[in-house]
Amino acid sequence: MSRSRTSRRIALTVPAVLGAFALTVLPAAATTSPAQIATSKTNGVAYLKSLQAADGSYAGSGLSNEWALSALAAAGTAAVDVTPGGDATKNARKVYRDLLATSGWPSATPVVTDYQRATLNAYAAGIDPARVSASRNLIADIYGYWQTAETGYFGPSANYNGTVFAALALAGAKTQAGAQRVPQSLLTSMVNRIRANQHNDGGWNYSKAEGSPTELAKPGDIDMTGASMAALCASGVPNTDPDITQAKAFLKSKIISNSGAFNAMYGVNTNSNGWAVSGLNACGINPQTGDFLTPLGKTPVDFLIAQQFNPGGGFKYLPSQTTPSTYASADGLRAVAGAGFTATPPVPTTVGAPQWVAQAAFTAGTATRLALTVDDGAGNLKVCSVAFTPTGTTTTLGEVLAAATTAATPAGCVTAVTPSYGTGTITAVNGKANSGSSTWKASVDGAAFTAATRGKVINLGDTVALRWGS
């Protein structure tokens, strides 16, 4: 992307999620063939590989090229296989993981979208976002921006974008086994906010519209409509849902018949088309048939392919431009490849390289964070990042909850636990006691909820959820 839109978009943070709609087999009505898509992917990957720095990096301080990692994954290329001059010691995954693990990353004044962007790209690169290092847990970093006064929002609610990408990151970055790692109650809280921000025309914009008839009456934006659709679908909303149907109708109303481009707020461009197509992909809506095949036989994918230089492989931002754009190339390739805003990491071709890398255990004496939710069963969901310094390679639920009473961000996630010592069954949290068949239960990384005991073993990077109920 070029122009002032670039800095605005990336500063708010670009991003996220999966549920990609495969475009390898297309109906006869589709105008871009599987062979053309395969060529686009091959050339697009070659261009993104050319952007890798001599030290192996795609990311650094400020705006960078890290969105290439999710596009590479979407196109079937593992980050660990991307090396400068064949130097495997500087492969893109290793260098990115090393960057995320540094204490100075992302900056002295981070915002929630820094961590959301990193989560989506780390996941695509085959780095478990919750286990980047002994001290870096990106899921917990996102949890720390939960808004206690406006539950369901992450980061200042005025920047609606932060909540959309929280949903994309937390729903999209699944466990290494492919499971949803955060509780559905958390995803539902974000879904409710996303629904409340949908404009009257069926689209969404970057800023908060909830509660303001004036804002809700304003035109929606192509980019954020795609991202919001993807966030809803990644969080479990079906593509038959009325809000998805309205968003689909909004996009349909903006398509230009002779090119397949969307008439975006900032004009026809690759990035807006990429975000819209990624939203459709994430919701399992084919962007080459039905509502998105124009009377003149063009689709949004046709437009993206037309924006790509071949054999160079890069995508231009505007149709009038003669040189490729880094951000347009990542957004365009990810969409053409059939992905949402991230993708499951491909199995590497490098001999001996695993699909995933992750820190295996706590390092005693190294400060870290864990992601914690507390659901009292009455609609009062608490979300926080718990800071503590382990004394061994594992810890216990009791120790995590004890730390949460004094070192949680935001504060107030846990105020009291009964009993306050030992390893036995937890009988009360925050003053709410077990009652008959309704008791406190615990889950880790999306596993089934079982009886909560203080002695339950918690490992590094575990996403911990407490829930009261039967």
Image (cartoon, helix red, strand yellow):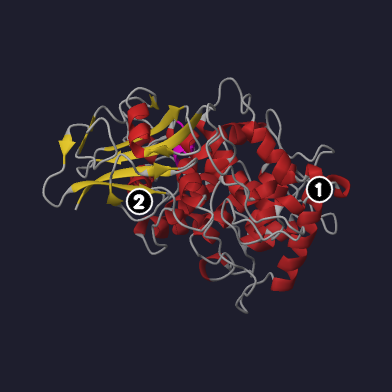
Quadrant including the N terminus: top right
- Can the viewer see residue 51 in this picture? no
Q: Is residue 286 magenta?
A: no
Which SS does the magenta portion mostly show? helix
**Relative to residue 429, is residue 254 depicted above or below?**
below
How far across and down, in percent of the image, does residue 137 sit? 52, 37
Image height check: is 35 above or below 67?
below
Tag 2 secondary structure: helix
Q: Earlier in the sequence, mark 2 or mark 1?
A: 1
Q: Which residue occupies the foreground of this view, 111 or 194?
A: 111
Residue 466 position, x and y percent, is: 30, 43
Instruction: Specify whether 192 is left or right of 207.
Output: left
Tell me the CA gap for discs 2 and 1: 39 Å
Q: What stretch of residues is rendered in magenta?
A: 158-163
Instruction: Provide the residue designation for mark 2.
Output: 184
Q: In this image, 312 relative to 274: left or right?
A: right
Query: Mark 1 highlights which residue?
Result: 88
